[in-house]
Amino acid sequence: MTFCVGFAYLQSEYVDNFTWALQMVKEHTTSGEVEVIVTDRDLALMNAVENVFPKAVNLLCLFHICKNVKAKCKMTVFPKKKQVQIMEAWEALIYSYDEAQYYMKLAIFEGICSSYSIFYDFVHEQWLIPHNVWETINSMIVLQHNEIIASFEKSIIQKVHRYSNRLYANLRGVVSKNAIDHIAAEYDRVKYSTLTFHVDASSKPSELFVKHEIDVIVKKFEELDVPGKISLKGKLREIVYPSNMSMFPPVAKVKTKDTGKVEKLAPRPSVQKLTLRPSISKVRHPRVLLFKYWLPVEIHKFIDDIIDVGDDGNCGYRAVAALLGMGENCWAFIRQQCVIELQEFMSHYEILFGGENYVRQLIHNVYVEQVASKDNWMTLPEMGYVIASKFNLVVVALSLNQSQTYFSLRSPPPTSMSDHRVIVIAFVNNCHFVQVLQPKVLHRLVLYE
């Protein structure tokens, strides 16, 4: 009973390929040493068997031997009835139990084949004379050697464009293309070095050492103030963890082709969202009186002062930074902290703002390092909740259309009234944010509103 234990798909029938396949078989053989291996008469396979299983006895497959003899019999023996008689005698010969039976069957086989000398000579020389195996194997080796020489000569004269430089000038036409491929692979490999943060005294200096750059970054980090340190740390985290960086591709717009035009209706003032546009004023002068006209009249008496900030599209974040005591130039720090807040509690804001895509678009809009474009200006009420939650304070946004107060979404309110932190910003000119300084009475008004 025979059965298949494996199948190897080989590119070509060479010794190396057969060796690999037999090694795979050897790795999965757990019943001890292999004693006998049966193959057909393939020189490459027989050599591979000798390399991988040196102690095993290599026997030729009787099926292939009979197939070879039968093919020769059909060409030289007639009639067909005689072919059947000769093949029966041949099978009886090769399936002999011992040496005595073998010689008895051999005499019978020779007697039947006496009238067919061509067939008998072929079988006698190919399979019945042991020393003739050497001649057959030698002929096969010579043939393979000639094929190798022809392939080598063809490989030498073959020109490859990538090997036309001076590095391979003394090799072209002397060694084969396969040999040059191995040399080129090793040459490319030695050009790479290991990137390391530590300098090995025994190794030569390398342009891949980054210890000096790391020292410069650490020194710069120690010289910065708290907002600067947080900003630098955030940039390093984006390099080390690119999957967590705050920049996202813009959200895909919904195609509206072939849809009917819808007449746009102006939103009601009570629910209108604050839209930001950069200030177009070029002359800097106090505008407190002008700004007051953009705020409800009822709260004018509670306002001590209105302080303007830069009009580069970051005015909302500038006002928040100034009211937190950092100075309006720390607007980038406020933006970065808002990005961190949105990323860290994205699941909360997805529920609050209506979906992951909206939050990701919001993060994309908040992430700005220079002058902000229209898509990157502060929007309310979204950023009101984000700023209040990140810095644990109360944010009051005043405007002529709608004034709103934003509390932290997570932390409980302080038990003492004096512990409340309140900042007030105002939206004026329909395009600009400013700081509002107010006495404590406005604090109480806001908290009890």
Image (cartoon, helix red, strand yellow):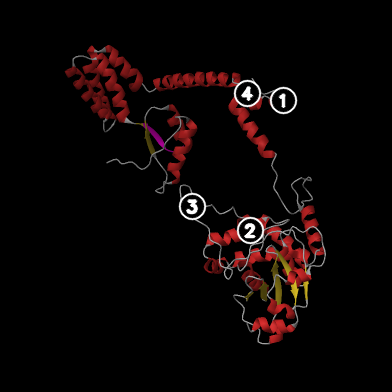
Mark 4 or mark 2, which is nearer the start of the sequence? 4
Q: Which residue is mark 3?
A: 261
Tell me the crowding category of disc 2: few under 14, some 14 to 19, or many 20 or more residues within 10 angstroms, Cα based. Answer: many
Mark pair 2, 3: CA separation: 28 Å
Q: Is residue 72 visible?
A: yes
Mark 2 or mark 1, which is nearer the start of the sequence? 1
Residue sitting at x 54%, y 59%: 357
Give coordinates of residue 297: x percent, y percent: 69, 77
* Secondary structure under the numbered disc 3 in the rendered image: loop
Tell me the crowding category of disc 3: few under 14, some 14 to 19, or many 20 or more residues within 10 angstroms, Cα based. Answer: few
Q: Is 70 or 320 nearer to us in this picture?
A: 320
Q: Is 18 or 47 nearer to us in this picture?
A: 18
Q: Is 183 or 48 nearer to us in this picture?
A: 183
Q: Which residue is mark 4?
A: 175
Q: Which residue is mark 1?
A: 166
Q: Which of label 3 and label 1 is nearer to you?
A: 3
Tell me the crowding category of disc 4: few under 14, some 14 to 19, or many 20 or more residues within 10 angstroms, Cα based. Answer: some
Q: Which residues are magenta?
A: 54-59
Mark 3 or mark 2, which is nearer the start of the sequence? 3
Q: Which residue is mark 2?
A: 365
Mark 1 or mark 4, which is nearer the start of the sequence? 1
Q: Amino acid at mark 4?
A: Val
Q: Amino acid at mark 1?
A: Arg
Is residue 306 shown left or right of residue 80? right
